[in-house]
Image (cartoon, grey):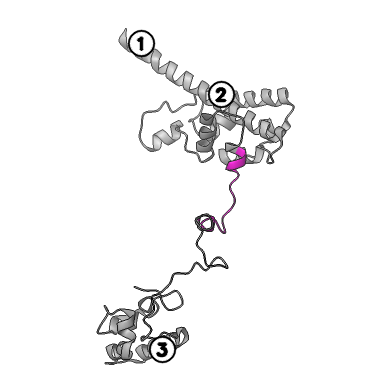
Amino acid sequence: MSSWLNGAYPAGLFPTLHKHSKRKNRTVAEAMLNDNWIRDIAHDLTVHLLHEYFLLWDLIEEVGYCALNTESDMLTWTLTTDGQYSASLAYRMQFEGGTPSTYPVKIWKVWAPPRCNFFMWLLAQNKVWTADRLQQRQWPNEYFCQYCFRNLETAGHLFKECPITRSIWTAVASWTSLGDFRPNTWAEKTSIGRSFDEVTPSGTSPIARGTRSLIILVIWSIWRERNNRFFSAQGEDSDTNHS
């Protein structure tokens, strides 16, 4: 269907009239030639059909379509003054009205190995394979946090709530004299991604960038130690079963 009525197509604007028409497979040129579209609907008209007919008539008059015009249609990019299409502009259009992401500055532009950046990107979206997410898929898991063995391992618990990791953040705060690193200053009941966004500074200064890098490296170290404990326990279980 061709959207030739101010960006819309007749069948979409007037579905009842379209259903009533005898011929639904005409081209626009065929329908407009000698007013064939009127003959297609000129039978058993009701008040509602007549109302749609007059509305459609007005739109056609407004468009000023001429069936005798044999010139080919041209596509025009209406979002630039010169009418030229731009791939970069089309890409930016997809994000109009959206909230700018802080990830480019706070995650990707830091002094850390790419694997750390990628892990932080996953963690900010709660896509890390902690026990709670493994349970949701009924995959094997150890359930408990590998540091405190008190709670179900979630991303929020592992990196924010666990008493062991909180002591790590407190030590880092004392070492760096950065008060925002102290867990008692963090907002409760917020996602790990939101907490990371609140704690990490914006800006492009070396201090801000270095602070973001430090946070990501600490988080990566917590995760690596968690994995070491998890897989060490798995290895001990295997040795016990074997013996």
Q: Are marks 3 and 2 in contact (CB under 8 Å)?
A: no
Dot 2 or dot 1: first in sequence order is 2
Residue at the disc numbered 3: 57
Along the viewing direction, whichever of 204 and 214 lies nearer the viewer: 204
* CA neighbours of label 1 inside 10 A, class few (<14), some (14 to 19), many (20+): few
Along the viewing direction, whichever of 227 and 167 lies nearer the viewer: 227
**From the viewer's perspective, is 191 left or right of 182?**
left
The amino acid at mark 1 is Asp
Q: Return the x and y of residue 27 as percentages of the image width and height.
A: 30, 78
**From the viewer's perspective, is 55 left or right of 197?**
left
Q: Is residue 139 above or below residue 191?
A: above
Q: Return the x and y of residue 131 as percentages of the image width and height.
A: 44, 31
Closer to viewer: mark 3 or mark 1: 3
Q: Residue furthest left?
A: 22
Give the magenta-colored segment's residue range: 91-106
Which corner quadrant holds the N terminus? bottom left
Helix, strand or loop at mark 2: helix
Dot 3 or dot 2: first in sequence order is 3
Residue at the disc numbered 2: 221
**From the viewer's perspective, is 125 left or right of 42?**
right
The amino acid at mark 2 is Ser
Q: Is 95 included in the stretch rendered in magenta?
A: yes
